[in-house]
Image (tube, rainbow, N blue to C red):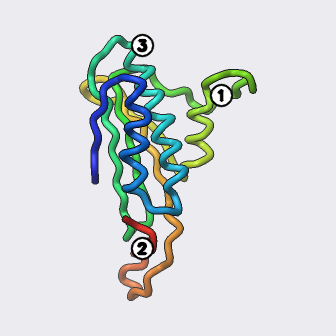
Amino acid sequence: MTCLLLPPHPASVSAARRWAAPLLPADVRDGVVLVVSELVTNAVAADVAAGTVEDIEVELVVDPPRGHVHLSVTDASDRPLPPSPVCVAGDEEGGRGLLLLDVLADDHGWAPRPCGGKCVWALFRCRCATVERPLTAPDRVRCADAV
């Protein structure tokens, strides 16, 4: 597990992308980096709208044995996510982040934090080869491209 704390500032989006990319397996890198970018963008916007200066926390857990990457982004906003992605007109500048999350992640969701704010998470499955193991450990997999 690795974690990055960022100020609620637009420059944090590119910093999060640069931080995450080298930590990720090659087969999911592009999708995860894009979702990192979208979720950090949303967190910056939510924190700015809420008038907070609390850091945004980005956490990555790369788990090759289980064949997944778990991403979570926390912000200080109590505003819940919409129940489903919304349609956005082609000429709109924003509003596609949750659509991208829905398409690129294998699973995702959000939860309110007990101390206020929320955590948005996403799970990405690696394209992993199954390790030949005894039947007692069938959930073990090997990610050839894992960091």
Instruction: Quickly name the residue at label 1.
Output: 86
Inspect the image, locate mark 2, and give the three-letter code of the amino acid beneath it.
Asp
Q: Nearer the viewer, mark 1 or mark 3?
A: 3
Q: Secondary structure at mark 2?
A: loop
| Picture residue at 42% right of the left edge, 57% below the top | 24
Q: Of the two numbered discs 3 and 2 on the same chain, state the one appearing first in sequence.
A: 3
Q: Of the two numbered discs 1 and 3 on the same chain, state the one appearing first in sequence.
A: 3
Q: Quadrant of residue 117?
A: top left
Q: Secondary structure at mark 1?
A: loop
Q: Of the two numbered discs 1 and 2 on the same chain, state the one appearing first in sequence.
A: 1
Q: Nearer the viewer, residue 111 or 53?
A: 53
- Rate crowding at label 1 as few (under 14), some (14 to 19) or many (20 or more) other CA atoms within 10 Å: few
Quarter of the rendering occupied by the N terminus: bottom left
| Picture residue at 28% right of the left edge, 45% below the top | 3
Q: Secondary structure at mark 3?
A: helix
Inspect the image, locate mark 1, and give the three-letter code of the amino acid beneath it.
Val
Tell me if residue 18 comes above or below residue 80 in the rendering.
Answer: below
